[in-house]
Image (tube, coloured by chain):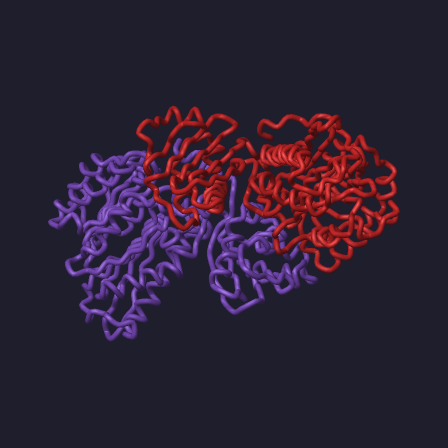
Chain colours: A red, B purple
Amino acid sequence: MAVGLESIKQLLPVPGVNLSAVSAGIKKNQRTDLALLQFKTGSTVAGVFTQNRFCAAPVQVAKQHLSQQPLALLINAGNANAGTGQQGLEDAYYSCGMTAEQLGLTQQQVLPFSTGVIGELFPIQKIVDSLPQLVSKLSDQTWNQVAEAIMTTDTQAKGVSKQFSWKGNTYTITGIAKGAGMIKPNMATMLAFIATDLAIDQALLQKLTGDVANLSFNRITIDGDTSTNDAFIVAATGAANNELIVDTNDQLFQLFKSTLIEVAKQLAQMIVRDGEGATKFVSINVGGAKTAQDALEVAYTVAHSPLVKTALFASDPNWGRILAAVGRAQIAELDVSKVQIKLNDVVIVENGGRAASYTEEQGQQAMVEPTIAIDIELGCGDLAETIWTTDLSHEYVKINAEYRT
Amino acid sequence: MAVGLESIKQLLPVPGVNLSAVSAGIKKNQRTDLALLQFKTGSTVAGVFTQNRFCAAPVQVAKQHLSQQPLALLINAGNANAGTGQQGLEDAYYSCGMTAEQLGLTQQQVLPFSTGVIGELFPIQKIVDSLPQLVSKLSDQTWNQVAEAIMTTDTQAKGVSKQFSWKGNTYTITGIAKGAGMIKPNMATMLAFIATDLAIDQALLQKLTGDVANLSFNRITIDGDTSTNDAFIVAATGAANNELIVDTNDQLFQLFKSTLIEVAKQLAQMIVRDGEGATKFVSINVGGAKTAQDALEVAYTVAHSPLVKTALFASDPNWGRILAAVGRAQIAELDVSKVQIKLNDVVIVENGGRAASYTEEQGQQAMVEPTIAIDIELGCGDLAETIWTTDLSHEYVKINAEYRT
């Protein structure tokens, strides 16, 4: 049911990264569910994590280990290891230790990631038992298999590769991500991993990772539910042998940054296109705001309105629901007489009411498209923000009512 | 699809109130859709209205007229007269003027109320044409018919009557309300009207009306969408001939207040029980909070989570979704190790994780009930709040996808 989401192409290997995926029996039907990424010695790794207070055991451990020059990521799908208390924490540490042993690393050099059902005990034995096979399969050619292994309710694997050149050198960025519900990242979405062969200072990479999250994963929402397990990791192996980047004024940094943003944005939009039950891909652009926070508050209020979402599903230009959502957004000031709203370039609201030029036929034409842009101009400032979301369909209810059956 | 909602009984007449309902042809199928309430001279009327910035034309007019000692309410269903700009405002004024003429009142003594589709022009001529018949039908016996006429997607009419006695006098309170979608009142819900024959000072009644709203209509949510048209009105006719109440220390005031709260709470809960597609009636009680605002923030975050709502619909004790919602609530401090969560008295979460005593069977037993209490103890203060909400079902999506067809 994904909206305009093409099957992913063969992802490009990133020099300095080996990876593998196996079935450890956590998911049903023998689907692959356990993955490992290993980075060459000297790689820098940065990450941002969920702001949910009930952050999962693996998130707590990954945050601690991030400063210890990690070189491996152990990722499982099918169990979130969240809401599992002290036992969950011990299982997460143990999984890192056992992985480290196989790779000749320290426990602190492994970051754990989990996605799946919250509140069930972690299947630690299944994972430990699968580690030898997982390590034996490490290869630089297996990005697509890993993208597949980290899926939960996703209908398609998600990945992007891009290359850019600078002074005769070609650099590669490959990233993978998974959705598809409990998506309103407040830092970064549920499991996105991007690697490059560029060499870049860790502190600089960490700052950049936060900035990139705010332009990509932190601008999407499916159901407003921030997960307990969100994590977004960027690893730079340095295998391309450029001089280590330590300065944001470096032109290579600028080129890397813009390509990285592009990769992250594409991955984030893929998650939305494959959102649970999605039949529409919707971008909500709010302009003319006094603050960026106001623009986001209006955009998310519209994006989370079940009434707006069901109207989108029905392709019904019931724009009164958009207007009502804008009107209830918690912002300090709003002069409704200045508000303009457009649906795919059709002006529906101006001067606080139905636009004089608006016809139901125009609205209908805009709403039948699978891709919808809702442009909201507040007319009280010059700040703007864009977020991406989906509709609310029968299929969404079905998926989430039957999730554990 | 209402949850445990009995058909309303014959509502009691309130001395000093006459009312009527007719079909003006605004709704389909000749259903009644236009109602009038008239109060005896000297009645005091108080009201609270939506905080939605795009508040509808009738709300703007009713707010202006409230201070002009109003004696009549004109209510239509089928068209919200919202998002209709200057024309909508003029139509609202005109409907008041024409009603006033029929009743021998001034235009300012009529308050207009509308509910229905947003953004379509107001059918003013149909309403004006129906006024003579509406006035001719005025009677004190027609509360049930009026409760019926103000319905939109409601499956049942909603009303409550209560009487109380004081020093040999019997006083009556009768109230009616309608839901059933775009319900997260931020002042009072979409159209609730309560009348009593008590005599009470207008300023006192106004203050009381706000307090009562905060204990009833402002504590319910179906979809988090605050309507453009919410209004909650209390009228006191004084026909019981008590000495005018001007003091909150008056014992009769206390008795009136507690009975009024009971009536308002019952009406509010009826709206939830008849929420669009509702299969569960859910009370969310948050205790141990530092501030009442924190308790409400946690309660509404859980109530609005589509993942929690679909789990409720499926009777699936997927309590990890409740935990995740608590964890993302925007409150200043939360020590997850102190959080306890119960589902109908089954302890599911303690010390930040799955309760040691919890079994899936217990959770399942709690979740199959049509009435669910979610008790969340934050353990960081002593303030508590309770709100009422519903689940998210296939029927909700169906109703809202097909609303205008």
Q: Residue B155, percent across and down? A: 39, 44
Residue at 36 percent across and 46 percent down: it is B53
Of A169 and A364, nearer the camera is A169
Residue at 46 percent across and 33 percent down: it is A374
Say left or right for B238 vs A70: left
Whether residue B130 is visible, yes or no, is yes
Q: Residue B189, percent across and down? A: 36, 51
Q: Quadrant of residue B92?
A: top left
Residue at 72 percent across and 35 percent down: it is A147
Of B242 and A381, nearer the camera is A381
Q: Which quarter of the figure is the C terminus of chain B placed in?
A: top left
- In the image, residue A398 sits, relative to residue B340, either above or below, namely above
Q: How many marks?
A: 0
Of B142 and B226, nearer the camera is B226
Say left or right for B306 vs B399: right
Q: Residue A337, percent across and down? A: 32, 40
Whether residue A401 is visible, yes or no, is no
Say left or right for B102 vs B394: left
Of A360 and B263, nearer the camera is A360
Q: Residue A269, percent across and down? A: 59, 34
Say left or right for B298 vs B127: right
